[in-house]
Amino acid sequence: MVNLTIVHYSSYGTAHAMASRIAETAEKAGAEVRLRRVRETAPPEVVESVDAWAEHARSVADMPVAEPDDLVWADAVIMGSGTRYGHVTSQLQAFIDTLGPVWQEGKLADKVYAAFTSSSTPHGGQESTILAMLTTFCHFGGIIVPPGYTDEVKFQDGNPYGVGVVTGGQETLTDTDNAALDHLVNRVLRVAEGLELD
């Protein structure tokens, strides 16, 4: 059985929906799953000034918050963030910045890693955001598992680096989005199962 940790930050709910789909698919495949959000670091008055942001923050208030031990526990990690100016959100980066002690101890190495993101427009920085996460995984000594074009769905969603969803006003994930997420998590689990896990 693979221990999978899914760490994400979501302002309006898209990344949360993606993370939830990954968790559901992984559990069906027999993985032990920890679904975690990162702490909100934006000032409360800023969050409350945007209705959709405030509503989503309230909806996940009771969800477990990611801690470094969640990554130490995992055999595989899938990390996700909305795109901010072609990079990860400051909230996810703040969590990554807490990982120094476990990284120094080598506790983040030799795990399987993958990433996902969302943006409001088709060229809103999805590739650079995912590549930023993959760069971080390189520093961890992680084993990066991109989806590539290893399934027909990748020719529909068009992202070989991870999974990217264009929100564009949509309220729910499409069938293509869900299929791409399912393919990513199943590929991650298959590779993780093939490794000699501690």
Image (cartoon, rainbow, N blue to C red):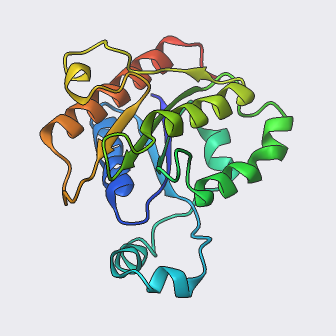
Residue at position x 59%, y 54% in the image: 92
Q: Up-down: is 157 above or below 146?
A: below
Residue at position x 84%, y 45% in the image: 101
**Residue 39, x across and y down, in percent:** 59, 66
For this orientation, the residue located farthest to the left is 175
Question: Is residue 163 or residue 30 the one in the foreground?
Answer: 163
Please give left or right for residue 176 compared with residue 158 in the image. Answer: left
Please give left or right for residue 84 compared with residue 73 in the image. Answer: left
Q: Quarter of the image for the N terminus: give it.
A: top left
Residue at position x 19%, y 55% in the image: 172
Task: Report the label total.
Answer: 0
Question: Is residue 115 or residue 37 the one in the foreground?
Answer: 115
**Residue 80, x across and y down, in percent:** 47, 45
**Residue 30, x across and y down, in percent:** 34, 32
**Residue 125, x across and y down, in percent:** 45, 41
Q: Quadrant of residue 91?
A: bottom right
Q: Up-down: is 196 above or below 32?
A: above
